Amino acid sequence: MNNEPTKFIDENGLRVDGRRTDEIRPMKVDIGVLSRADGSCYLEWGNNKIISAVYGPRELHPRRMQRPDAAVIRYKYNMASFSVEDRQRPGPSRRSSEISKVSSEAFEPVVMTQFYPNTVIDVFSEVLEADAGTRTAAINAATLALIDAGIPLKSLVSACAVGKVDGQLVLDLNKKEDNEGEADLPVAITQDGEITLLQMDGHLTEDEIKQAMELVKNGCQQIQQIQREALLKKFGQYEGADTEIQSVPLTETSSKQETESVDTESSELISSNILSDESSENQEESGEEQEPDTLDILEDETEQSEDNEDDSDEEDFFVEIVRNNTEGESDDQ
Ligand code: ADP
């Protein structure tokens, strides 16, 4: 029997899945995949497969649960029984309740709930396949599903974990690293750099936590870029592009939603604009509040690497979706 401790990083600095310590797993995103949800997103991240669905805003019952000044956000994270190697017992668990609570708090600062008093926004994230990092994957998917539902957000929320294996900090843990490593630190960050989720399992020194935060911020920025590209693909138009870019439906059933969403009349998708830095800055300076039911994903003013210069069209992108959500209640759940 081999009693040597597991080695997570080889002599070339590569991890068990071939990544470098600062690399995230490949991510694939498809927005608007469920026809009966108000907003939805399917996200694959490494071997994780997650679907998020948003229903609402709609009137909250019982009424005593309503907030007269804002919508209530109800977030439910669930791992399907078939999502892990050993069958996961169906129904809520302490783990899923905890993840639902902390993830809900990760969104609350960015959702402009004040426009929807007395209502509820239900957000469901179902883990179809789990391979570590499911809570962060679900946050990334749910953010896009909220946007797909036309709910105004102040910012994207991008989430990623950082951890420690073989005494080294590594970004975006896979299952082996998560289960057998020395630490796991999931984080969610807004575009302004506000941290809305921070948990930690294991042991890190103060210095390691500082380094880990730098690493994970970088990971979240990469994810934010993927989220923005997915939005662009679904709703957007590149400046100078000949045709509108539409996302490819994953399934037959998603085609209806895709068609509806790209049809400016039926979905009330009002416009996709390229805004300069100046205009978004002016808007912020003037302190003008956005109209209700308007979603803005503003220019990321954080550092952009020189490598990304070619993507400047995307970087300048501003998506504006207007939907009258309070009128468009869904009966389905
Ligand atoms: P996260 O998925 O957010 O990293 P955890 O650290 O709790 O959350 O879990 C890490 C991974 O361990 C999960 O993604 C999943 O692959 C596996 N896992 C978690 N809970 C269970 C469970 N009850 N049964 C089997 N595997 C599980």
Image: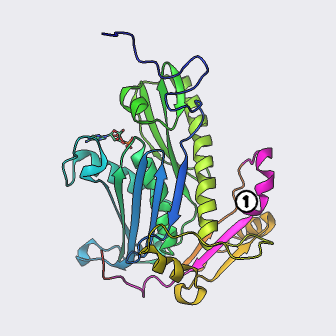
Categorize mark 1 by other alpha carbons within 10 Å: few (<14), some (14-19), many (20+): many
Disc 1 residue lies near ligand 1 with CB under 8 A = no
x and y percentages locating residue 88 in the rendered image: 22, 46
Q: Residue at x 53, y 72 (%)?
A: 152
- The amino acid marked with disc number 1 is Glu
Residue 174: % across, % down = 44, 36
Left or right, 166 with respect to 88, comes to: right
- Whether 201 is drawn above or below 232: the answer is above
Quadrant of the rendered structure where residue 125 is? Answer: bottom left
- Residue at the spot 56% in from the left edge and 50% down from the top edge: 194
Residue farthest along the bottom direction in this orientation: 265
- SS at mark 1? helix
Query: Quadrant for ligand 1?
Result: top left
Question: Could you tell me which quadrant the C terminus lies in?
Answer: bottom left
Q: Is residue 57 above or below residue 23?
A: below
In this picture, is 212 found above or below 217? above
Viewer-nearest residue: 285 or 214: 214
Q: Is residue 127 visible?
A: yes
| Residue 130: % across, % down | 36, 46
Q: Which residue is mark 1?
A: 315
Identify which residue, 291 or 140, lies in the foreground: 140
Magenta stretch, residue numbers: 303-330
Q: Give yes or no for residue 131 being in the magenta stretch.
A: no
The answer to whether residue 106 is seen in the rendering is: no
